[in-house]
Image (spheres, coloured by chain):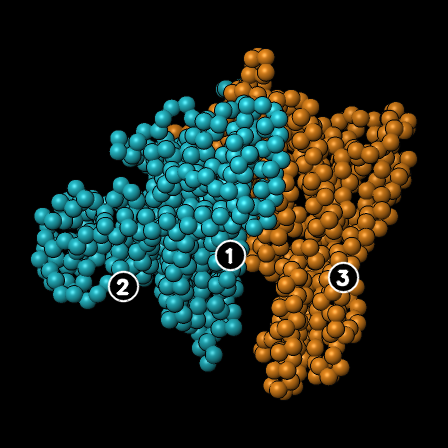
Chain colours: A orange, B cyan
Amino acid sequence: MSKKLTTRAEDYSKWYNELVVKADLAENSGVRGCMVIKPYGYAIWEKMQAQLDKMFKETGHSNAYFPLFVPKSMFEAEEKNAEGFAKECAVVTHYRLKNDEENKGKLIVDPNAKLEEELVVRPTSEAIIWSTYKGWVQSYRDLPLLINQWANVVRWEMRTRLFLRTAEFLWQEGHTAHATRQEAIEESEQMMHVYADFVENFMAIPVVKGLKTESERFAGAEETYCIEALMQDGKALQAGTSHFLGQNFAKAFDVKFANKEGKQEFVWGTSWGVSTRLMGALVMTHSDDNGLVLPPNLAPIQVVIVPIHRTDEQLDAISAQVKELMVDLRKVGVSVKYDNRDTQKPGFKFAEWELKGVPVRLAIGPNDLENGTYEVARRDTLTKEVVSKDGIVAYLQDLLSKIQADLYQRAFDFRDTHITEVNSWDEFVDVLENKTGFISAHWDGTPETEEKIKEMTKATIRCIPLDRVEEAGVCVLTGKPSTGRVLFAKAY
Amino acid sequence: MSKKLTTRAEDYSKWYNELVVKADLAENSGVRGCMVIKPYGYAIWEKMQAQLDKMFKETGHSNAYFPLFVPKSMFEAEEKNAEGFAKECAVVTHYRLKNDEENKGKLIVDPNAKLEEELVVRPTSEAIIWSTYKGWVQSYRDLPLLINQWANVVRWEMRTRLFLRTAEFLWQEGHTAHATRQEAIEESEQMMHVYADFVENFMAIPVVKGLKTESERFAGAEETYCIEALMQDGKALQAGTSHFLGQNFAKAFDVKFANKEGKQEFVWGTSWGVSTRLMGALVMTHSDDNGLVLPPNLAPIQVVIVPIHRTDEQLDAISAQVKELMVDLRKVGVSVKYDNRDTQKPGFKFAEWELKGVPVRLAIGPNDLENGTYEVARRDTLTKEVVSKDGIVAYLQDLLSKIQADLYQRAFDFRDTHITEVNSWDEFVDVLENKTGFISAHWDGTPETEEKIKEMTKATIRCIPLDRVEEAGVCVLTGKPSTGRVLFAKAY
């Protein structure tokens, strides 16, 4: 609270870094690349988890838990996956420390406690899970397996940023096994839709659903479905992925089943995940120069009430009325906090709850008490209104719904005006440099062109939109023929 | 389902190991000492988590998340804690794998990717958390910090058993910081009571609350409070611990605050945890030779309904009635499953749900349909009753409450008859060998005697009960004076 936030116009990246720390979402830890998720940030993550978990269960999935460690020989079994993650694996080589005889009070790794086989700290769990599924699947009756895991994973990133890219992060990873190719494809599509539903209706972030190109695909997948969001600075952020794994992992781990005719077949697989990265998307979609703006569906505190008083008698009268209101609000499921700290002035409290993104602030002073009113302030629009205390509960419920819808609409409009169709390389470069956002352009379908564009501009193909229309055109870079547009953008 | 369980009388340990796997709770993984928690086992753990989390929040705690890794220098800062855990630490030394040029398709640890400082995989998080708290605490206004974390931890155990002792396990760890010694002691006592409340009222397991002796204390604690349970084989199991840390970690990590007078003081700390080990206690307290017995408060499925029919018409009529009942049961919060699989006979289903410990089974056949009845079977007593379908919902609600209470009472009676007061060494050895259970005996208060008894009998002091009465006596081994009894037992 000590110093004003850097504004987005000044330095968007700095604004983000400062905001995440000042709003008590997370901070860097004493461990390289690993973050501490602070209670306020974790409370938002818990709300996200609870909603996603409900949606996974409604679509038939159960939770389970698989080991943190993957023996190296197991890790390398599916070659593409192993190759994709080998460069960023934390590796456990020893299982004991001992006293350093040369430095009293210091510990060193005990050379006598070297593991026979090194253990990889899971960067993702396909290997350990498919090696387990081998024991769970014999017949078509054992399928499908519809399992999800909430876990921590580790990818040794060289440049890290809170939530967006950290060495350790929290996520969920679904891993399913099916009897047919078609069923597995349907599962991966279903989970992409579940993610889109969650991100749009709870996070209030519009997304484009699409397919990744071959070079952007998950290592070991035959197809990667994704949802792509657009941040306020015009950069894209991949908000969730769902992979159709074909029979790749089943073959690598020899997972077969007897079909109805008794014939042995390899199982078909999917995996899908979202992570604490979504917290970064939440911040970068809605927040402003005053701090966080949280959608009511995910705000740990939806309504904060600040008393304004000069005397203790005034405070007592205010508190008595507020306590009744809080009971009524909680009855209808609104989470509310009464900030009656006597150590801070109202102005300080207003700024603090603004910084923390509480959707609605109520203030009540002696005049309000007399007039039977509250001052109601919206965090998203920074507007105020005086509202009668009669019917205030229904008013606040409506207002919270309206804020949720308005946040989505605002983000949607921004995204909508930041998808630009371009038909020449000059236009491509111009939009990328000046307007930013998604660029809808023709591409000749080759990884070489994709790579060249990336090298020249840092823009990547975010996805081939699922709803794209067939359209004859020519590649924006090579002029070769194309049958439809893809979405390019610079990305987080 | 293929083979009968080993009975408890035959081999209690084998019975446990078989049951955990056959009832689909957990299994060993391809990673040494690490388990896979299967969906059915995880569903029980989720219920335990949900209830504990609620109780933590009701007592003012918030969740947060701290890094998996602890740099070696940070780990060793609190000497006793470091020494206590050094012998069982998994250590990350490298952050990359690379292709093995001599073995195509194989990966090796990249020697060029050695970490400057090794990272310990957290065996417990005091070090990383107190190093963070240093940045969070300046003044008495920042206190108390009341934080909990749900996480995985790793302790490299040489001999492991599913749930009871695994290299990786899931747990929660509370870490609180306070301005005064008294407040920290009250917090550690409060959390011991919260644990006891949970274990007794949800797991239906009676516990003894007590203090650990110095040699059994958590490494780095000034006092360890514990709850101790008794398993059916007469061995004790530590079900939860709560530690008063004094200022040990505050001093090791230099965590000070300015008190109201502006004077700098070290902060006082506590930590407390329960783990997936509780799953083992649950199995070993209630289950029998037919399989699991789950207390209704933690059973993922409280009521299972099995149709018995010869014709499709009969099944249709049964299903129509059952569907209505299910709606009514779910309305009042009873979780119910209708097992209408056509691939299995009723007898197979009965045995399967018995194995899985579902508290109540309803069977309904054509006669029941005609008579307006259900056959209701209790898992805990293996008794059956025919009950009218009128009022069945209330009947089942009552029955579930009664089963919960009866399970607790049965375990309590067993525990009660297995606390034996002994006054001589011969009696001590006799009870330990023949009757088993807790032994209430005088002890001279020295670690030497405690150690000697452990060496001679494998029995340890489980706790100094909080409710013990002052009583002059003589140590059961040395004959030296004592002022009160302590509880000995062999333990898991």
Can residue B44 be seen here? The reply is no
Q: Residue at x 74, y 30 (%)?
A: A213
Circle 1 residue: B54
- Residue A242: quadrant of the picture: top right
- Going by the image, does B54 lie left or right of B477? right
Mark 1 touches mark 3? (CB < 8 Å): no
Q: Residue at x 14, y 53 (%)?
A: B422
Circle 2 residue: B467
Q: Nearer the viewer, residue A29 or A145?
A: A145
- Going by the image, does A38 lie left or right of B248? right
Q: From what the image shows, is residue B215 above or below residue B362?
A: below
Q: Secondary structure at mark 1?
A: helix
**Mark 1 and mark 2: Cα distance apart in space:** 28 Å
Q: Amino acid at mark 3?
A: Asp
Q: Nearer the viewer, residue B425 or A155?
A: B425
Q: Position of residue B337 (x, y in %)?
A: 54, 38
Q: Amino acid at mark 1?
A: Lys
Q: Nearer the viewer, residue B304 or B66?
A: B304
| Mark 1 neighbour density, 10 Å: few (under 14) some (14–19) many (20 or more) | few
Q: Are marks 1 and 2 on the same chain?
A: yes
- Going by the image, does A347 lie left or right of B147? right
Q: Chain of mark 1?
A: B
First reached walking from the N terminus: tag 1 or tag 2: 1
- Residue B366: quadrant of the picture: top right
Q: Chain of mark 3?
A: A
Q: Position of residue A77 (x, y in %)?
A: 53, 24
Circle 3 residue: A398
Q: Amino acid at mark 2?
A: Asp
Can residue A62 be seen here? The reply is yes
Q: Chain of mark 2?
A: B
**Mark 3 and mark 2: Cα distance apart in space:** 54 Å
Q: Secondary structure at mark 3?
A: helix
